[in-house]
Each structure stands twice: as C-alpha cells, then as structure tokens.
Amino acid sequence: MEPLRVLELYSGIGGMHQALKDSCVSAEVVAAIDVNTIANEVYRHNFPHTQLWAKTIEGISLQEFNQLSFNMILMSPPCQPFTRIGLQGDVSDPRTKSFLHVLHVLPRLQKLPKYILLENVKGFEVSSTRDLFVQTLENCGFKYQEFLLSPTSLGIPNSRLRYFLIAKLQSEPLSFQIPGQVLVEFPTVEAANSQGPTVTVDVRKNSEERKIEPNPPSDDNTQCSGKETFLFKLETAEERKRKLQQDSDFSVQMLKGFLENDDDMSQYFLPPKALLRYALLLDIVQPTCRRSTCFTKGYGSYVEGTGSVLQTAEDIQIENVYTSLETLSEEEKLMKLSMLKLRYFTPREIANLHGFPPEFVFLGSAPDSPDFSTPVPGAFSTSFSRNLLTLEDDSTLFYDW
C-alpha cells in the first residue's frame, strides 16, 4: 500500500503524529495545523521535517485543502465546549467554529479522505456537534465506530476517559476487535438531558446497528451522596473499595514502571501549606498502585482535583497518619503528614503516563529553554515547567489510544 498522506488538524504538540509514527503504518504527515505558538515550537522540535501551518483552521480555504491532496485526517478539536465541568456551549461556543468549518468543507473536497480519526473529551458523545459530525460522515458515505477509552484500558495506571471515532470510506461496516477492558458504551443525547433512567448506545455496533443497553459503571471518581460514612480523609467506604479493586487489577501496570529514577526529588515535595490545607482532599498513590487520577493543567499550582500525588515513604501506613489528625495542632499535623513524603509527579512522569516515549522532547515557553528531562529548581512555580500540562489541552494526546 502506498504511504498515507495525512492531514493533522489541531496538531498541538504532536500526540497523534507520534502515535502514527509508532504504529508503523506507512504514512507521511503532509501538513500539521495549529495556532498555539508554544505547542508549535514543541511540534517543530520533534518533527522538524513536517510542514507546520500556524493559522486558524477556519481561515483555510477549500482550494488550500484540495492542494494538500490528503487521504487521512487526524484531529482533536477544542474540548472546552464539551467538557463536563465547563459551560457546555457545544455548537454555540466560538471554539467550535473551526470544527464546523471542517464539516462544511469535507463534503466539498475534490477527493474524500479514506480515513478519519477524531479524539475528544467524554461529553462530546452527547453533543449536538457530534450529531452534526456523524450525519456529515454518513452523508459522505463513511462507516464509523465510536469508543470511550481510558489509558487503563491499555494497562496504563491513569484514568483519563476520552472519546474516539474512527471512520472509513467503504461500503462494508467496520468491525474492530475491542479489548476486554475498553469502555464501550456511552449515553445518548436524549438520556443525558432527561431525568429518567440512563440508557446507552452500544458502540460495539457500527453506524448502522445500534441498540439500547443499561449504563455501565463510570471511570470517574465516585461522588459522595452525603449519606455514606467517611473513613479517614474525605473518603467513603465505597470509594476505598473501588481503589482497592483498581490496585488489584493485574491487567494494569504499577506506577513504579512510569517513575523517574532520580534520588533528588526535593523540588517536587508538597509544601507545608498545601499539606495542612488539603490533607483530607489529596488523592494519594504509591509506586505499587495501579491507578492515578487524571492530571489537569492546574497540577502543581492547585491541589484539589488536579491529579494524584505520590507517597514515597512506602513503609508508612496512610491510615495511621490520618487517624485523629483533626485533633492535633498544626505542628503535630505537619509532622505526621511529612512522614508520608508526598510529592508531585514530575513532568516527565506525567508524559510517561500519557504514553509519550522517552525521546519526545518537551520545550519551555521559548525555543532555547530547557526540556523536561532536566530537573528545574522550583519547577512547579515556573511557567514553562507546566507547559506539558498546559499543552495537554492543546495536543491531541491520541497516544492514550
């Protein structure tokens, strides 16, 4: 087969390009398009021979698209209009405009691409934008399959549930073999907006065969209803049980396989103020755990809900530290909490959990700034050291796939 000519939209730092490269599929990225200047510097450093367009997608004409002569599209449109904790502006959000332009251009191309792959956040699957997308695909003659996948589905100890759609220009329906741990169902738009029992689309079916089935357990952290009994920390018995089950799942690797072997991690330890203020809210994991929560761009600046922290003193029982913690003075609390030796995950470790290979370089906010393979003093108080997490929202992170 001749090499695929790939158009990479919303290219970010090159997550999809890296995945395409490691898939060993014969392909050439004929153009990558993104407006984020910092992301483009990272992309250009790792893929110097790829044509990179620093322009808006809605500013690209039909003629320019046709001149690229591509037969595959990879894309991860802006997720903010669909994220569950956002305003969910959907098609009315200005950030959706570029994707709507893609849907306008697609049927008008001189030659339709053979393949399309799209990634986005959980929430996209119940959006009006998604409905417009699949309607456009069907009108153009594509067959498609949709998935909800998390890195845990592939044995990576990080919960990061994401939506994927694969489309192929062919007459026969797609039929992929789906790994046993993959989450294969998600709510319909009607179910998400209703107050009644939730129903789901079985995405193991293709675009022509769908059925309604009960909703599966969520990959997200369990929310306390207010009726459960708290154990230590702000954690219920049900949440504790869920975490123990995750750590007993041998299909998922231990975190220690993703950690850096660096004796000096002092710059990443949680400061006393954060320990005292957020002790009861921390999601604490150990190197032998097989789980971690989704990291966000606020990680290192904010503590609550931005990602897990690592307990490096593995011989200390966390229950013993948290017992009667509320009755102690601040000095005594700090002394007990310090026994756990809690630290943030390093940027390189987070990159490892996102599937980026060791040779992938993350630059700072300037082309000549250091990469994340070199520890930086006060790393989480500097802007460029958080670029991996900031760029994460601008990159495709297709490597989760």
Image (spheres, helix red, strand yellow):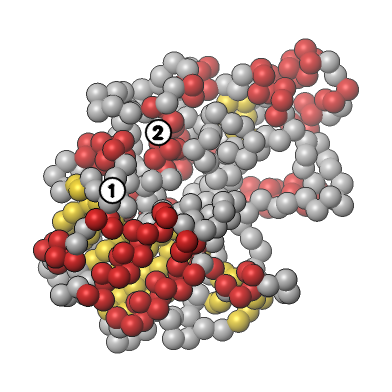
Q: Neighbour class for label 2 at 10 Å: few (<14), some, many (≥20)?
A: many
Q: Name the residue tied to disc 2.
A: 387
Residue drawn 32% across and 69% down? 103
Looking at this rendering, what residue extends furthest in the top direction?
A: 331
Residue drawn 57% across and 53% down? 87
Q: CA distance from mark 1 to mark 2?
A: 16 Å
Q: Neighbour class for label 1 at 10 Å: few (<14), some, many (≥20)?
A: many
The image quadrant where one finds the C terminus is bottom left
Along the viewing direction, whichever of 392 and 95 lies nearer the viewer: 95
Amino acid type assigned to the residue bearing label 1 in the image: Asp
Amino acid type assigned to the residue bearing label 2 in the image: Asn
Residue 133 seen anywhere in this rendered image of the structure = yes
Residue 176 is drawn in which quadrant? Answer: bottom left
Q: Nearer the viewer, mark 1 or mark 2?
A: 1
The x, y position of residue 12, in whole percent, is 32, 46
The x, y position of residue 335, in whole percent, is 74, 15
The image quadrant where one finds the N terminus is bottom left
Answer left or right for 139 relative to 156. left
Residue drawn 84% across and 50% down? 226
Q: Name the residue tied to disc 1.
A: 34
The x, y position of residue 399, in whole percent, is 38, 52
